[in-house]
Amino acid sequence: MSDIIHLLPDSVANQIAAGEVVQRPASVVKELVENAIDAQATEITISIVDAGRTSIQISDNGIGMSETDARMAFERHATSKISDASDIFKIRSMGFRGEALASIAAVSQTELKTRQENSELGTKIVIVGSKVESQEPEACPKGTTFTVKNLFFNTPARRKFLKANQTEFNYILAEIYQTALSHPEIVFTIMKDGVLYAKYPKGNQKQRIVSIFGKQMEKGLLPISDESSIAKIYGYVGVPEMAKKTGANEFFFVNNRFFRQKSFLASVLRAYGNLLPQKEYPPFFIFIDIDPSEIDVNIHPTKTEIKFSEEFNICQLLEASIKCTLGKNNIVPSLDFSDSADYSDMFSFKNADPIKAPTIKYNPDYNPFKKDEAAYPNAQTNVRNWEKLFEDFQTSKQAKNQDFALPSKMNEIKFEEAKDDVSVSFCTQFQKKYILAYADEKIYVIDIKRAHYRLLYDEFSTSLKEKKTPSQQTLLPVKIDVTADQSETLKEILPQLKELGFDIEQFGQNSFVVNGAPTDICMSDVQTIITEFVAKYEDSHDIKCSVQETVARTLAKSASLFRNPEMTSEEMKRFVSKLLANKSFTITPEGQIITVIVEPEDLLKKFN
Ligand code: ADP
Ligand code: MG
C-alpha cells in the first residue's frame, strides 16, 4: 500500500490554527491592539466597519517594522518577543506566541503598512488568505497600520457563524475596554462606520475608567492598594450600591494582562460579604503586579486564564485589601484597618492552615451616602431592619400623599389592605429566607423575596397598564451619564420611554437630560431608574415586545432587594394572606417558584 501521510500546505495549516486564535472580529482587534502596545505605541486608532465584517483597521505610532520583519511577521511562530522556552516564564509583553498575524492573514485580506522612525520609506504588504499578493516600498507615517478586510471570506461557514452586528461590536468593545483599562497612558480612538465613536485621552487609572464607563462610575469607586513580598495589588472597587445582577464590570489584570479566575472573584465577593444583595456583583478594576516567573500565561490560546503559583496567598491579600477599603470608607464599620495595616505575616500561612475571618462589627443604620442620597437612592438596601424600612416608607408616603412612589420608597407591601379571605393560622420563618405558613388546611412554604417581587410587580404593571396617556411632570433637568453602548441602547428606546411619560433627550455623546417624567415617579430616583432600566434592557432579549412589562419587572426587582428580613408573626400573617390572595402566588413573572404547597393527604401518607 502506498504512503498516505503528507504535510499540509502552510496556508491550510494556518487556516486551521486560525480557528483557535481568530474566533470573531473582536479577536482580530485584541491581537492587533496588543501588538501595537508591545510596539510601544502611545496612540492607537481602531476603525471598525460593519462590526468588523467588512474592515478592521488598527493604526499605531509605535516602533514599526523593517522590510524583512514586515514579511517575517506573517510566518507562523514568528515573534520578536521570546527566543527560547524559558522566556515564557519571563513574559512582560502582551503577545509571545507568534501566531496572531499568520492566523489573521490566513482568513482575511490583510494589508500592512509600516515604517520605522529611521527609515525614509516604509513597506506595504498585501496578503490574501496567506498568499502574499504584493510587497513594495510605501511612504507612510512612523508606526504600523493593519487593515483586515472581509474576515472569513474563505471560510464561509465561520462567517455565517457571526452574530448580529451589535453583538459583534459589543465583543469588540469588551476587548478594547480590557486593553484600554490597563493602559491609561495610551490614547485610544475608536471609529465606528466612519464616525468617531469614542476617544479615551491619556490619563490616570481612574480617569480612564470614567472615560470608558461614564461619570456615574466615578462617585462609587473606592481605591485599593496593598503590597506584600509576593505581589502588589491596586485599583478600584465599587461601593455595594453599584452592584448589578448581570453585566457588572469585573476586571482583573495581572501585569496589565486581563484575566478571569473564579478563585479571585470568590475572594472579592467574600470581602463584600453580605453587603451585596444575593447574586449581585460589584464593579471592580483590580491590578496585580507580580514577578512573571510566579505566573504561567501559557494555559489557554486566548490567554484569559492564568495560573498563579501563589494563588491562595494572593487571594487572601486581595480579600483583606478590599475589606480594608470598605472598612476605611465606613461601608463595613469595622476592624481597625489603619493605614499602616500590615499583612506581612499573612504569607506564613500554609494552604492547609485555617484562616480566621476577622470579626466585623456592622452598623446597620450607617449610610455612607448621607451627603449624596439622590445619587444612591438604593443605599437603603443596607438597612436590615424590616420594620424600620416599613416605617420610613409610611412616613415618606404620607408626606408625599402618593399612591405609587418609586423605587427607593417602594419597599412596601400594603399589609393593612390585605384581603382577609384567606385566614392564616400559623406562620414561622426558617432559614430567614422562607416562611412556613398554615392556611386553608394546607402548608405553604414561601420564598419571601420572590413573593415580595410578585406583589410589587403586579402592583406596578397594573398601574402602568391602566394609564392611557401618561401625565407628566416637568423637572429641573437631571443629567444622566451612561456608557457608550448604553447610550446606543437608550437612543433606540427613547420613543418607548416617551410613551411612558419620560421626556429625555441626548446631550453630548454619552449623556442624556431628563426634562420630564411620569407623575408617579419620584424625581430623586429618575437617574437610578433610567440607568437600571437601560442595563436591564441590554440584558433582556424579549423586552422589545413590551417595554411596560420590563419597566414593571425592573422596578419590582430593584424594590424587592432587601434580604432576610426578620418579621414578626403578625407581619408574616398579613404578608402571607396578601400573597395568597394574589392569583399568581406560586410563580414569579419569570416562572421561578415562589410557593410550595404541601397537601395534608400527601403529608399524612408518610405516617402510613
Ligand atoms: P506575537 O505578538 O506573539 O509576537 P504576532 O503574530 O502577533 O506574534 O506578531 C508577530 C511579530 O510581528 C511581533 O513579534 C512583532 O515583532 C511584529 N509586530 C506585529 N505587530 C506589530 C506592530 N503593530 N508594530 C511593530 N511590530 C509588530
Ligand atoms: Mg501578537
Image (spheres, rainbow, N blue to C red):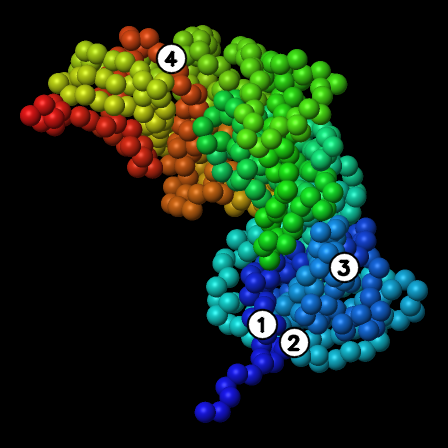
Viewer-side residue, 266 vs 437: 266
Q: Which mark is residue 578?
A: none
Q: Spatial distance from mark 3 to mark 2, Cα to Cα?
A: 22 Å
Is 34 on the left-hand or right-hand side of 360? right
Q: Spatial distance from mark 3 to mark 1, Cα to Cα?
A: 23 Å
Sequence-wise, which precedes: disc 4 or disc 1? 1
Is 552 on the left-hand or right-hand side of 254? left
Is 447 on the left-hand or right-hand side of 316? left
Q: Which residue is disc 1 drawn over?
A: 15
Rendered location of residue 601, percent (x, y): 9, 25
Q: Spatial distance from mark 4 to mark 1, Cα to Cα?
A: 61 Å
Residue 527 in which image quadrant: top right
Rendered location of residue 551, percent (x, y): 42, 34
Sequence-wise, which precedes: disc 2 or disc 4? 2
Q: State whether residue 206 appears in this view.
A: no
Vertical side of 467 occupied by 72: above or below:
below
Q: Are marks 2 and 1 in contact (CB under 8 Å)?
A: yes
Q: Spatial distance from mark 2 to mark 1, Cα to Cα?
A: 8 Å
Q: Secondary structure at mark 1?
A: helix
Is 170 on the left-hand or right-hand side of 549? right
Vertical side of 311 occupied by 155: above or below:
below
Q: Which mark is residue 81?
A: 3
